[in-house]
Amino acid sequence: AQSVTQLGSHVSVSEGALVLLRCNYSSSVPPYLFWYVQYPNQGLQLLLKYTSAATLVKGINGFEAEFKKSETSFHLTKPSAHMSDAAEYFCAVSFYSSASKIIFGSGTRLSIRP
Amino acid sequence: EAGVTQFPSHSVIEKGQTVTLRCDPISGHDNLYWYRRVMGKEIKFLLHFVKESKQDESGMPNNRFLAERTGGTYSTLKVQPAELEDSGVYFCASSQEETGISGANVLTFGAGSRLTVL
């Protein structure tokens, strides 16, 4: 069965520190991979997506993610955290056969310490 | 352009009552989706409309949930009668078919409707 696992329901980093949010997926077919972010009282916003082109994907707000097939991972990183990055982040996957049905991870809440 | 709008933002009802959630997609988006997040768990797919037709309703939990999209514009999701386990955040999303990237539809989500069943 296809699934998405996000390691760590809550991650806290200092302002200016590296942000690393982990995501692993389980799939027997090539996936499309996404990271969404939800700021307080707002909808889910697409950060970036992987669709079988370049394995290193750059998104908005300085975030990027690397697709590693051998590790079935799609970790999200940002070199230097900003206070405005505090939000909940969701890794998600879909597949060509059912591209409209997105499978989400359970989310990781990112806190930024001053 | 206006985003996906959901109403109400928060609803508190008692077990056994009825609640209707509404979603207004982005104008011109034929695809409309409902998702639900229960108690901090995963966001799970409920169903997918293409215009007024239900394309996929495999995620609907039971027959207490009824989704409609009359005229292919806004959609409603009714829960009747509501149970305690229905509490959560209900997200609506819409999309257009994305050209150039086969199959990877990008969804635009609303802010969600939080449902609390007491």
Image: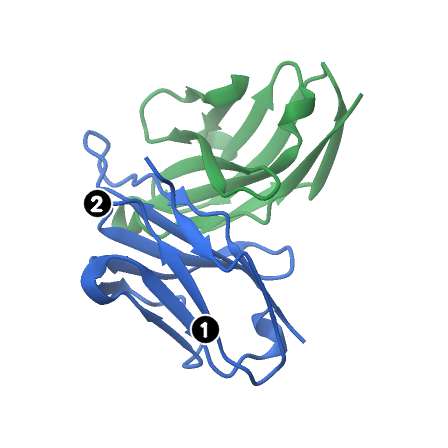
Q: Amino acid at mark 1?
A: Pro
Give the chain letter at badge 2: B
Q: How was the colour assigned to the protein in this rendering?
A: by chain
Instruction: Kindly identify the residue that appears in the image at 41 percent across and 49 percent down.
Output: B5
Within-10-Å neighbours for mark 2: few <14, some 14–19, many 20+: few
Q: Is residue A112 left or right of residue B99?
A: right
Q: Position of residue A25 (x, y in %)?
A: 49, 42
Q: Secondary structure at mark 1?
A: loop
* Residue B25 point in image, percent of width and height: 32, 50
The quarter of the rendered structure image containing the C terminus of chain B is bottom right
User: Which quarter of the figure has residue B40?
Assistant: bottom right
Real-space Cα distance between discs 1 and 2? 28 Å
Q: Earlier in the sequence, mark 1 or mark 2?
A: 2
Q: Nearer the viewer, residue A32 or A44?
A: A44
- Dot 1 crowding, Cα within 10 Å, few <14, some 14–19, many 20+: few
- Chain A as rendered: colour: green
Contact between labelled residues 2 and 1, with CB atoms less than 8 Å apart: no
Q: Secondary structure at mark 2?
A: loop
- Residue A90 vs residue B74, the one in the foreground: B74
Instruction: Find residue A107 and name its label.
Output: none
Q: Which residue is mark 1?
A: B61
Question: Are labels 1 and 2 on one chain?
Answer: yes
Q: Is residue B85 above or below residue A86?
A: below
Q: Which residue is mark 2?
A: B28
Tell me the shade of chain B: blue
Rendered location of residue A19, percent (x, y): 66, 23
Give the quarter of the image for residue A93: top left
